[in-house]
Amino acid sequence: MAQRLIRLTLYDDAILSALDRLSRVRKQSMFVVEALRHYLDTKEGQQLLLALTESVSFQRQSETKIHGIVEKEKSKSNIDDIFS
């Protein structure tokens, strides 16, 4: 199983409270993954993911053109690819 380290800066009191409660039972990562999975199942979540990954892909393509290398990068916007 792949492991990711995520650093968050949070300002929402409800989210901070939930994560504090989850930290006592060591379930933060499971909760975050499940919340992200449910969000990405929604149309809004898919649109946001597509928007964010397209901007990153566009930036990388611009960088490769500057160096004289043109490559077409594939972005992972499929939920199965992200969680596999």
Image (tube, grey):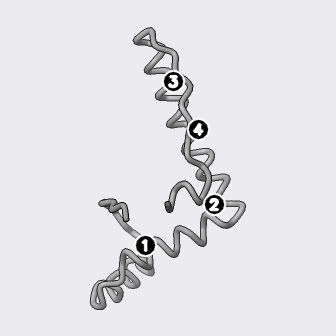
Amino acid type, callout 2:
Gly
Find residue 54 and name its label.
4
Amino acid type, callout 1:
Asp
| Residue under numbered circle 1 | 12
User: Can you tell which of label 1 and label 3 is closer to the viewer?
Assistant: 3
Question: Rounded to the nearest whole Å, what is the CA distance between mark 2 and mark 4?
Answer: 14 Å
Q: Is residue 20 left or right of residue 64?
A: left
Find residue 61 and name its label.
3
Question: Rounded to the nearest whole Å, what is the CA distance between mark 2 and mark 3?
Answer: 24 Å
- Residue 58 shows in this picture: yes
Where is residue 29? Give x, y as percent: 37, 74
Where is residue 19? Give x, y as percent: 36, 80
Q: Give the vertical position of 58 relative to 70 (above or below).
A: below
- Disc 3 is placed on an element classified as helix
Question: Rounded to the nearest whole Å, what is the CA distance between mark 4 and mark 3?
Answer: 10 Å
Kindly identify the residue that appears in the image at 62 percent across and 47 percent down: 50
